[in-house]
Amino acid sequence: MNNRREKRPGSLSFGLMFRPGHFPLPHMLACLKVAEDVGFDHVWFGDSHLIWHEVGPYLTAAALSTTRMRVGPLVANPVTRHPTVVASALATLAQLFEGRAVLGIGRGDSAVRTLGLPPMKVAEFRDALRLIRTLCRGEEAVVNGTPVRLAWLTRSVPVLLAAYGPRVLELAGAEADGLILQLASPGVVEWAVGHARRGASAAGRNLDGFEVVAAAPTYVTGDRERALSRVRGFPATVSNHVKDLLRHYQPGELPAELVEGMERVAGYDYLRHGQPDAPHTQAVTDDMAERLTLIGTAGQVREKIQRLAAAGVTHVCLYLGIVEGEFHFSTLETYGREIIPHVR
C-alpha cells in the first residue's frame, strides 16, 4: 500500500541532507524511498569535492530514484566552479526531472578552504549570484561582454542563498529566491529573517514565496547525552563562519545564540568536517550543541520546529548523522509519524 503524503501548498516542508560518500549509495537511495513515502519534500547533498564525493552523480541518482522530491546541493559555490557551470548543471537537472531542481549557493566554505582559498568577497559574490539566477530563469546575461543564455531551459531553478552575516543576509532578501540558515535556533532565525526583509525593502521587493531553510543535525531520542554526543560536530562547523563574522562585526552586533562559545573552538580540521568526535569538538558545550540542532524526544523536536516556523522558517532540512546508518530509517519514520503531520 502506498502511504505517500503530499505537501499542502503553503505548509512547512521537510528535507534531508547527505554528505556524498559517507554511506553506500544503495543505503542513501533506500533512505530516500522511506523519506518520500513519509512526507519529505527535498533531498540535499553537501558539495565539497575534496573531502566528499563529487556531488553531481548523487543529484542525478536521487532525482532518478524519487518522483516528487526536489533535489539540489547544500551548498554549491562559484569559486570551485564557474557560475555558468553551476547554473547549467542545475538547469539540466531541472530540465530532465520535471523542474525538481533547487540550487543552494554560498560564498564557499570547506570546498574552497581545502584549496587554500578564502570565501568569495561579497561584491564579487553578488555579481555571481545575479549571473546564476539570471541563467537559471532562462534569461540572457552578459559575461565578459558576451551575451550568454541557456536557450534550452524551459523550467526555472530557484536559487537559495546560504548566509550567516548581515550583509549576505540582506543580499539574500534583495537578490535570491530564498535563504539557507545552517542552524536551528529560533532566535537567530528571527534576527536573520529581519535582515533579509531589510534587504528586500531596500531593493523595493516583497518576499512573497521567499523560502527560509533551517538546516541542522537531528537526533530523536530521550537520551539527551547520546543525542548531544552525535551532534557535537555541528557547532564547531558553525564556529568557522562566526569567526569570519567577528572580523567585521562586534559580538554585540550579532545574536548571542550564534556567537556564544564559538571563540573557544580551535584547530578545525576540514578533513573531519562535521564529525562528532573530531578533536576540534572538545570545546563545544552541551548548550552550544543543543541550541543549534534538533535533538530530544519527538515532542521536544516538534515544539522547536514550531518555534522555527513562527520565526519565519518555511523548510526544515535534517542532517542525518555520519554514523549509525540504520538509525536513519527510524529517524525518518519517526518524523513521518510523530513530527511532520503535527507541524504542517
Image (cartoon, rainbow, N blue to C red):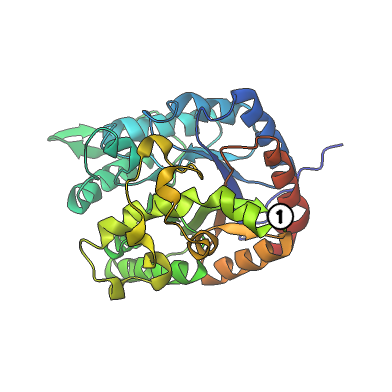
Query: Which residue is the extreme one toward the left?
Result: 145
Q: Amino acid at mark 1?
A: Thr
Residue at position x 64%, y 39% from top? 68
Picture quarter containing residue 228? bottom right
Q: Position of residue 272 (x, y in %)?
A: 42, 37
Q: Residue at x 58, y 30 (%)?
A: 62
Left or right for 256, reference 213: left
- Apparent side of residue 341 relative to residue 205 in the rendered image (left or right): right
> Where does residue 337 sit, x and y in percent of width and height?
78, 52
Q: How many marks do you count on the picture?
A: 1
Q: Is residue 147 above or below residue 108?
A: above
211 left or right of 328 in image? left
The residue where tag 1 is placed is 221
Looking at the image, can residue 324 be seen?
yes
Q: Say which quadrant the C terminus sits in.
A: bottom right
Q: Residue 330: x, y in percent?
A: 74, 43
Which image quarter is the N terminus in? top right
Q: Residues within 10 Å of mark 1 (few under 14, many from 20)?
A: some
Q: Position of residue 188 (x, y in %)?
A: 44, 68
Q: Secondary structure at mark 1?
A: loop
Asked if residue 265 lies left or right of residue 332, the reply is: left
Which is more toward the observer, 74 or 52? 52
What residue is at 27 percent from the left and 70 percent from the top?
Answer: 202
* Residue 172 visible somewhere in the drawing: no
Closer to the camera, 198 or 185? 185
